[in-house]
Amino acid sequence: MAPPKKSKKAKRDSKKLKKSRSVSVVPIENKAAESDWWDSFWQKNSPTPGSTVPSDEEEGFKYFFRVSKKTFDYICSLVRQDLVSRPPSGLINIEGRLLSVEKQVAIALRRLASGESQVSVGASFGVGQSTVSQVTWRFIEALEE
């Protein structure tokens, strides 16, 4: 027999309790590394002759994420506290560091803006499919808060 399901209110209350008990952890990546994600993403996806990707970086940013850099920074500021306050165990990059908030937002926005598969989005950022899935859901939950 399956265990009884919790009501939505009980789940929400337990989430709030967990959130109030969480310890604030700051990602290990520094400010210089925060812009690194864009540089590596742009190099992997920069325009080639015959592609529809704009050659200007600012326009390229809008093309990939459907928002300007200014709006992107604003979105990051909205979700930063929530994403930093409860770091996930699995959101670690190849070097063993936590993914920056900016990279998490970029992954989620790219997934939501493009409709590409999680595998394709993950390949663009050098992360796996499960990381894309987890980042996207955490981003959506942070926006809801």
Image (cartoon, helix red, strand yellow):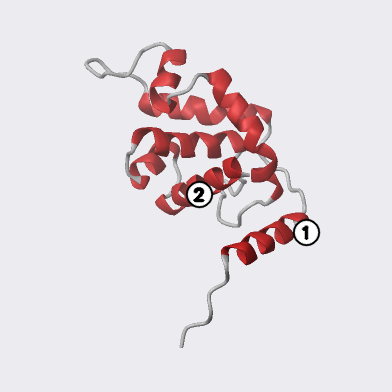
* Depth check, front residue: 35 or 135: 135
Determine whether, in the image, residue 84 is placed left or right of residue 23: left
Q: Secondary structure at mark 1?
A: helix
Query: In the rendered image, which residue does mark 1 sit on?
Result: 21
Q: Which comes sooner in the sequence, label 2 or label 1?
A: 1
> Given the image, on which type of amino acid does mark 2 rest?
Trp
* Residue closer to the observer: 74 or 25: 74
Residue drawn 35% across the image and 34% down it = 114
54 relative position to 91: left or right: left
Which one is in front, 92 or 5? 5
Rendered view: 49 above or below 81: above
| Disc 2: which residue | 137
In percent of width and height, residue 37 lies at 52, 31
Residue type at numbered disc 1? Arg
> Can residue 99 be seen by looking at this rendering?
no
Local crowd size for mark 2, using a 10 Å CA cut-off: few (<14), some (14–19), many (≥20): few
User: Residue 120: x, y in percent?
Assistant: 34, 41
| Residue under the image location 21 percent in, 16 percent down | 50
| Image disc number at residue 55 | none
Q: Residues within 10 Å of mark 1 (few under 14, many from 20)?
A: few
Residue 18 falls in image quadrant = bottom right
In the depicted structure, whether residue 89 falls above or below residue 60: below
Q: Please tell me in which quadrant of the rendered image residue 48 appears.
A: top left
Asked which secondary structure carries label 2, the reply is helix
